[in-house]
Image (cartoon, helix red, strand yellow):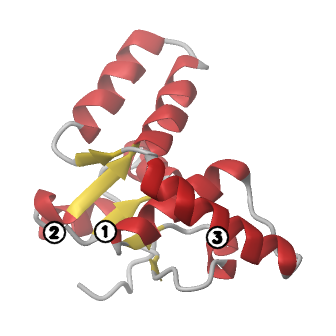
Amino acid sequence: MRYLLDTNVWIHYLKNVASPVALRLQKTPASEVAVCSVVWAELLHGARKYERRDDRVARVERTLAPYQSLPFDDAAARRYAVVRDDLESRGKVIGANDLLVAAIALNHGLVLVTNDAAFGRVTGLHIEDWTVTNVAS
C-alpha cells in the first residue's frame, strides 16, 4: 500500500467518475490505496446531509469497500501529538480532522493524496494531487 486518499479527493471522484482521480484509481492496484476512519466519517456525514441519504451512504460504502481502511489508533495518536506540537510551535495549525488524517498517513509511511494545500505545512508528509490531469502515473 502506498497512498492514503483524503476526503476532498474522494468527493472529487464521487462527483465525477470520469475525473483524473478515476483514471489514477484505475491504474493503481487497490492494494496500494487506503482510506482511513476519519475520511470514512467525513464522507458518510456528507452523504447524510442531503436528499437521498440512503443512496448516497450506499454509494460511499460501495466506493470505499475495495480499499483497506486504517484506524486512528494509539500509534497515530502519538504521531498526531508530534505533528500538532510542531505545527502549533510554527504557528501553522491545520484543521482538526486534517491533523488526524496526516498522522495516519505519516504513521503508515503513505503518500497523502489531496488537493488541500494546508497539508503542505506538515513536516515530512508526502503529498500528491490526483485531481489534476498532469499527475505522473
Instruction: Kindly identify which residue carries mark 3.
Output: 82
Instruction: Kindly identify which residue carries mark 2.
Output: 28
Q: How many marks?
A: 3
- Residue 20 is marked as none
Residue at 53% across, 85% down: 124
In percent of width and height, residue 116 lies at 62, 67
Which residue, as the protein is rendered here, is positioned at the far right?
91
The amino acid pointed to by label 3 is Val
Question: Mark 1 and 2 residues: CB-CB less than 8 Å, in contact?
Answer: yes
The amino acid pointed to by label 2 is Thr
Closer to the eye: label 1 or 2? 1
Neighbourhood count class around disc 1 (C-alpha, 10 Å): few under 14, some 14–19, many 20 upward = many
Frontmost residue, 62 versus 97: 97
Structural distance between the alpha carbons of marks 1 and 3 = 21 Å
Closer to the eye: label 1 or 3? 3
Frontmost residue, 120 versus 51: 120
Instruction: Kindly identify which residue carries mark 1.
Output: 3
In percent of width and height, residue 63 lies at 26, 38
